[in-house]
Image (cartoon, helix red, strand yellow):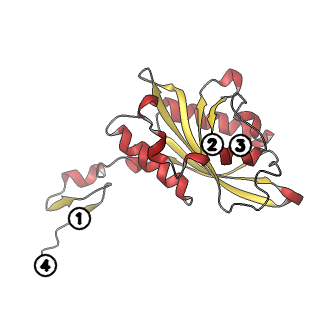
Amino acid sequence: MKHPSTRELFDYWNACRGGRPAPERGEIEPTAIRRALADTFILTVDERTGHPFRIAGTRVCALFGRELKGEGFLAQWDHDSRALVRDLITAITQEPIGVVAGASAAGLNGQRLDLELLILPLCHHDRTDGRAIGTFSPLEVPYWLGAHALSTLALGSLRYLGHAVASNRPPPMATSLPNRRIIKHGLVVYDGGLA
């Protein structure tokens, strides 16, 4: 994760969920992610309507040159990326896992703008297939932000944030080995016998 907003939202989401698959939507406190809020969005997971934005932060809206509330998230992507983005949203809500991905779009005068995308599931009435939260952050904020809208997005590389990556549990093999101390975030320290 390259962008500070991506890391802040992921760390907060991970802390809120504890040992659960995902935190409840009502547990998300905007002031706790205030530095990432401008880059944050919440989607309604509804493939029929293109996963519309429920909320979109000010910088997300500025990237597209308009208020995004109610618009379909899938409609922002080019034809080649749209099916994959749809499948990513399905995967994160059914597994539940997160995904971090690169994206790009043309901005002013055709200049390429690289962005980082994070999408994480949220529980809504004890189900993970109704809401998703994420960030959409430019890796470098262009001077024309808000004055010119991006073209449609193209999806780049992606990485799933599965249970082993995103949890604070040690890797399964480590729990069966003797002489170990478990620290935070899955880091395991093995005693080597040196005093």
| Residue beneath disc 3 | 61
Q: Position of residue 181 (x, y in %)?
A: 18, 60
* Chain-order first, disc 4 or disc 2: 2
Q: Position of residue 98 (x, y in %)?
A: 50, 42
| Residue beneath disc 2 | 57
Q: Is residue 91 left or right of residue 193?
A: right
The residues bearing labels 4 and 2 have C-alpha atoms spaced at a distance of 52 Å
Disc 4 element: loop
**Mark 2 surroundings: few (<14), some (14-19) or many (≥20) residues within 10 A:** some
The residues bearing labels 3 and 1 have C-alpha atoms spaced at a distance of 45 Å
| Residue beneath disc 1 | 189
Residue 16 or 167: which is nearer the viewer? 16
Contact? badges 3 and 2 (CB < 8 Å):
yes
Q: Residue furthest left?
A: 195
Q: Residue at x 61, y 50 (%)?
A: 101
* Chain-order first, disc 4 or disc 3: 3
Residue 153 or 7: which is nearer the viewer? 7
The residues bearing labels 4 and 3 have C-alpha atoms spaced at a distance of 56 Å
* Chain-order first, disc 3 or disc 1: 3
Numbered disc in front, either 4 or 2: 2
Q: Residue at x 83, y 61 (%)?
A: 111
| Residue beneath disc 4 | 194
Q: Is residue 70 left or right of residue 125?
A: right
Task: Identify the image quadrant of residue 78.
Answer: top right
Numbered disc in front, either 2 or 1: 2
Numbered disc in front, either 4 or 3: 3
Which amino acid type is shown beneath numbered disc 1? Val
The residues bearing labels 2 and 1 have C-alpha atoms spaced at a distance of 40 Å
* Chain-order first, disc 1 or disc 4: 1
Q: Residue at x 67, y 28 (%)?
A: 52
